[in-house]
Every structure is written in C-alpha cells, then in structure tokens.
Amino acid sequence: MSKQVYIARYLKIINYLKRGQATFEDIENYLERQSEIEGLDFNISQRTLQRDLNEIRTIYSIDIRCNKSSGMYYIADEEELNENQHLLASFDMFNALRLTSNYSELIQFENANVKGSEHIYPLLQAIKSRSQTEITYKKFYEEDSEIVLIEPYLLKQFKTKWYLICKKSPSGDVRTYALDRIQQVDVKRKRFNDKFDVKTYSKNCYGIIHPTDQKVEKVTFSFDADQANYIRSFPIHPSQKEIKPVGEEYFFTIDVYITFDLVSELLLYGERITIHSPKHLIKEMKGIYTSCMKKYSA
C-alpha cells in the first residue's frame, strides 16, 4: 500500500471522528464503505488502527483516545483540532489530487503564484527539529541574493502566498520572508533553544505585517444584515466579536494592528462596511475614497 493511501486513511479517520465518538466497528464499516466508493484499500484491523492513531498523533498532533469502558474512540483535544483545521484541509486537498487521476477537468484552481512550495517540507522539518537554517533570499527590486542564517518558527499562508516567520541570527530580529523569494534552503545540524511565542507575536496581526511602532487598537465596524451573516461565518480576524446591533445595522469589533494589509481588506467591502472607530482609520479610509473619486471625476 502506498504512503498516500495511508495518509488518506488517517484523514478519513480524523474526519469521521470529528462528527462524534465511534466504536472500532463504526470506523471499520465506514472505511470499508469508503474503500468501495473510491476503489482503494482503506480496510483496517484493530492493531492497524492503533498504529494509525500513533501516526496521526505524530503527524497532525491530534490525540485520538479510546474510552475503555464504552469502547468509543474520540478526539481528546478539540481545541488542538480547531487550530489544525487549515492544515487538515490542505492535506485533504493534497491527497485527493494525488489519489485521483485525470482531475484537470474536475478542479479549477485560482491562477496564483505557488512558487516556493518546494521549500515547505524542509522548512517544516527545520521548525519541528528546531534546527538553524540558511536560506538564500532575493528581495524584489534587488539584483543580488543574500544568504541569511535564521531560526525558523512558523509557516503562514496569506492571500495564496506562503511566508516564513523566523529570527535572524545572530541579531535575534524577527523577520518575515516570502517563500517565493527563497532560492535555496540549507537545514543545519546545530539546534537552537530560544523560546519564541509565535501565537502571541501574531495574535493581533492581520496578514504578515507586525509593526514595532504601533499599539493594538480596537476597530469597530458595521454591516447590513446580509453581509453580517457572511462576516459571522468568515470573520475578518480571530479576535472578532459581535456587539449590540442598532436597528438593521450589525456591529463588530476586532483587536488588531492597523496596517496596510488590514486597510486593504476593509476596502474590499466597499459601501457595505462602515468604520466607526478609531478616528484615524476613518480619516485614512475617507482619504483613499476621495483620491479614487478624483481619478474618475470628469
């Protein structure tokens, strides 16, 4: 059996248990049905299931346990599962494409630049093993590349592109590098022990910009009922909260650094969004709209 089929089976087990607890017989019957549907062998024994659960714990950091009294398998840490949703979705897509032939007419991708994806695996290995890494990086509008020694901490996707958040050595400055500008990755044997809380670092960021000269601000905005339903399902930022509506206007807040990335996102909503605070953001939005109107005035 190929490694791709193993991975696909791990994902099916995870996705099945996301629905709720299940016995081994439930999981066995589900995988048997999936084998018939997809024409692949996902069948397992109890011994195989235990091996799969160990692999799932290692690869995805998802702990699946069995209640010995009831014989029910369940995902132990729902919070960890939620944090891994994007990663799981990427694995789902990857395996669907690897296991399906002649899919070019079935799936249409956005015409996006995916250059640099070959660096994801070695960088993930470097992050996991906490290994110092040299990257060869070429900035936009510069002819020469530079070799940078880094301590890698996080891979982040934003607007179809991938970025690496790391510390530059030996200065310790936190940097963000676009993977499409990385020409080469050389993972070193030397380990680093520095502790860096990536979650805290990026908690109030929208996008990849983390300003060092700004404070976090509360942004208040509102939408009509239709757009509010969309924003509830797809929040602008993880800190988003809904506050008391006024008539047919629905109000939300986010706690963020106000950066170019954030302003660009808010502008995408056009006339459907109203910014209520802070005042300097309202002024900036007005200035942008005024400049745009001037370009189209006869």
Image (spheres, rainbow, N blue to C red):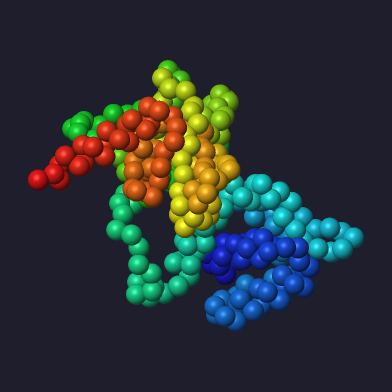
Location of residue 170 in the rendering, given as x and y in whole percent from the top left corner = 43, 19
Location of residue 205 in the rendering, given as x and y in whole percent from the top left corner = 46, 34
In front here: 31 or 295? Answer: 295
In front here: 246 or 125? Answer: 246
Residue at (52% x, 62% y) in the render = 92
Q: Relative to residue 31, is residue 264 drawn left or right?
A: left
Location of residue 255 in the rendering, given as x and y in whole percent from the top left corner = 51, 33
In front here: 249 or 179? Answer: 249
Residue lying at the far top in this picture: please name it.
171
In the rendered image, is residue 76 in sight?
yes
Residue at (44% x, 25% y) in the render = 174
Location of residue 240 in the rendering, given as x and y in whole percent from the top left corner = 54, 42
Up/down of 68 relative to 257, above or below: below
**Quarter that holds the C terminus:** top left
Up/down of 287 relative to 71, above or below: above
In the rendered image, is residue 175 in sight?
no
Which quadrant of the figure has residue 227? bottom left
Which quadrant of the figure has residue 238? top right
In front here: 243 or 209? Answer: 243
Residue at (47% x, 61% y) in the render = 94
Q: How many marks?
A: 0
Q: Relative to residue 25, is residue 215 drawn left or right?
A: left
Residue at (60% x, 62% y) in the render = 11
Residue lying at the far right in this picture: please name it.
69
